[in-house]
Image (cartoon, rainbow, N blue to C red):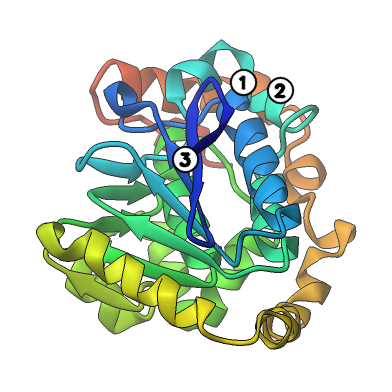
Amino acid sequence: MADHEFEDLLYETNDGVAKTTINRPDSLNALRGVTMAELIAAVEMAGYDKTVGVIVLTGAGERAFTVGGDVKWEKEGGLAERHITVNPRGVHDAVRHCGKPVISVVKGYAIGMGNHLAYCCDLTIAADNAIFGQNGPRVASPAEGWIVAYAARVVGAKKAREMWMLCRKYDAQQALEMGICNAVVPMDQLEEEVDKWCQEILSLSPTCVKIVKASFDSDVDYMRDPAANHFQMMLAPDYFSTPESKEGANAFLEKRPPDFKQFLR
């Protein structure tokens, strides 16, 4: 049943599962400030709900889990806003601190924050049309800190750097082989597969599962040290007002290759 009304999300609980759907299909479920704030609220709400044992995150439609930050919103000042009021790391922190397994269910594109949100979830199940990858350096939208560094835990140091520094894309089978996702199934079998994984988790001791999740998360606690999560402010404090930042967003919206060579220094 639907339990709570959100602007950018659909949220429902049923038989021990809290399902949160990013509901902006016309923008390929791109994330703006409202979306990220609501994701934090939804995950925290599910974490406190004593009737919930598993949390599922997915995107509306079959074209995208989420393509990451809404570039139009970012161009209008959202990038600066997110470091003041809505930090994307808050969504990842909610996932890791909620005390319950979080499964990302990926259909279509999981790009940018969609990719690192997927690999930061406890488990990821993908449809066979899934495409994973980073896009920040291509659109001048920087990510930093533990959500970047954690990729090396998932796919290995060299592959993580390839993913982030070259902005390459990986299909569902490649993502499975890399360790980004746990399973890949045909689209028409996805819902059934997710339900199987949820029910398997719900058959286990919830307290034991909570302890296991906390144990895994303790391995990356040092990555979340505030000193290691503010590289943009240390290296380029005025970045969002620079021509380089504007070039990335403008090129994306104008559907042309960005000219970043002019900013080499």
Residue identifier under label 1: 78
Percent position of residue 31, x then y: 49, 31
- Front position in the image: 214 or 153: 214
- Report, in whole angstroms, how far the alpha carbon at label 3 lies from the one at label 2: 34 Å
Q: Is residue 105 above or below residue 4?
A: below
Q: Is residue 104 left or right of 169 when viewed as pictured?
A: right
For label 1, the SS is: helix
Label drawn at residue 1: 3
Q: Identify which residue is drawn at 15% across, 64% down.
A: 189
115 left or right, relative to 173: right
Q: Amino acid at mark 1?
A: Gly
Q: Nearer the viewer, mark 3 or mark 2?
A: 3
- Crowding near the residue tagged with mark 2, few <14, some 14–19, many ≥20 C-alpha atoms within 10 Å: some
The answer to which of 134 and 12 lies nearer the viewer is 12
- Residue 107, percent from left and from top: 25, 52
Q: Report the residue marked by disc 2.
A: 81
Which element type, helix, strand or loop, lies under badge 2?
Answer: helix
Q: Residue furthest top?
A: 76
